[in-house]
Amino acid sequence: MTAKSIHTKTTSLAIPPQALVAPLLPLSSTHAGWEGVVSYGFHEPRGMEGWKVSPNGDIMLMVYAGGPIHIERQWAPGSWRGENLQPGDMVVHWGEGAAYTVRWWSLRAVPTRALDLHLSRQLVHGLAQELLGTDLARGALERQTVIRDPLLTQLALVLWQELEQPV
């Protein structure tokens, strides 16, 4: 799979992408039995205001595909902080901290999709200990970070393709 496939792979929608007013969830792994991992595939509206995010303890990786978007976050009380996300970018949320509000808008007419991977904290801490000899519980994790890692992106896209397979 190449980076170009990030732009071209789509899942059919019952409604046109431009008619979406909230994220549409056509894909989920909740019934797949993946231990410590749950994934959700969303079709995103062209713009969204006031999306509330409440950390639930899971570490979340969000991979974006399709068109680029501008996303902004606000932790109350505070000002909006934003950045542009390109296809293949991943946003990491460490599952801790205060709730925040998100808004975004598409930068092109290409529909945007997002894959949210929820990883149990226990799974991630166990892997860090086993593979790296690092105790993540002792270190302070950043609130949220955008990363551009081709290997992680490809792994996420493989999971996405797995979700798109008929059961």
Image (spheres, grey):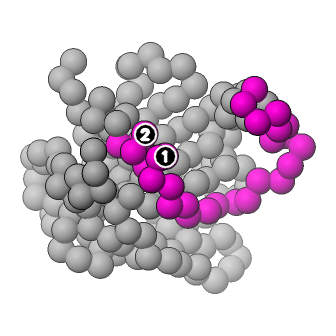
Q: Secondary structure at mark 2?
A: helix
Q: Quadrant of residue 160?
A: top left
> Where residue 55 appears, x then y in whole percent?
63, 49
Q: Is residue 117 visible?
A: yes
> Where residue 58 appears, x then y in whole percent?
63, 39
Q: Is residue 13 magenta?
A: no
Q: Quadrant of residue 143?
A: bottom right
**Amino acid type assigned to the residue bearing label 2 in the image:** Leu
Badge 1: residue crowd in 10 Å (few <14, some 14–19, many ≥20): some
Q: Quadrant of residue 70?
A: bottom left
Would you place residue 154 above or below residue 21 in this image? Answer: above
Would you place residue 36 above or below residue 44 in this image? Answer: above
Residue found 21% across the figure and 27% down from its top: 165
Pointer 1: what residue? 152
> Where residue 19 appears, x then y in whole percent?
15, 63
Q: Is residue 116 visible?
A: no
Position of residue 24 in the picture relative to residue 154 (left or right): left
- Farthest residue toward the bottom? 79
Front in this rendered view, residue 111 or 16: 111
Residue found 19% across the figure and 49% down from its top: 9
Marks 2 & 1, CB-CB < 8 Å contact: yes
